[in-house]
Image (cartoon, rainbow, N blue to C red):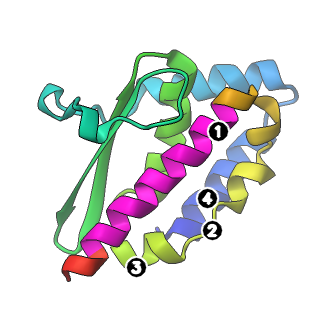
Amino acid sequence: MNIKEIQKEIVDEFAMFDDWMERYEYIIELGKGLPLIEEQYKTEENIIKGCQSKVWVHAEEKDGKVLFSADSDAILTKGIIAILIRSFSNQTPAEILEANTDFVDEIGLKEHLSATRANGLVSMIKKIKMYALAFEARN
């Protein structure tokens, strides 16, 4: 699946829920399925700056695709990064760089987060795009 298709799937999943409590629970569930980062990558270099909780994101390139793993010490944040990783992992650097993140607004995520969590979300997206940029520059 390409990024747009994955993002549409995520938007459709969130549309099934009537209220934000159900959506928060779903985000937490998604976090439980997150491809976890290996302990060796829980470094200062991989930490997301601007998040109120600790979030680590690691990326590696395999066969021209970027594979992400992550972890967080907060259950809601773990779910948020899981949504982003699901959207962008296993895509080419160019596809990641070209992709928009409108789906985040479509599911209403930003408006239902505290200001610091919303800033953290933006920082997570920036970090993912920076990894893609680095891999793109190497190719």
Residue 91 visible within the image: no
- The disc placed on residue 64 is none
Depth check: give the residue in front, 42 or 17: 42
Q: Secondary structure at mark 2?
A: loop
> What's the residue type where badge 3 is placed?
Ala
Q: Is residue 116 above or below residue 8?
A: above
- The disc placed on residue 94 is 3
Q: Is residue 114 above or below residue 124?
A: above
**Residue bearing mark 1:** 119
Depth check: give the residue in front, 30 or 57: 57
Q: Are marks 4 and 1 in contact (CB under 8 Å)?
A: no
Q: Residue furthest right?
A: 18
Q: Nearer the viewer, mark 2 or mark 1?
A: 1
Question: Residue 36 vs residue 53: left or right?
Answer: left
**Residue bearing mark 2:** 100
Depth check: give the residue in front, 66 or 50: 50
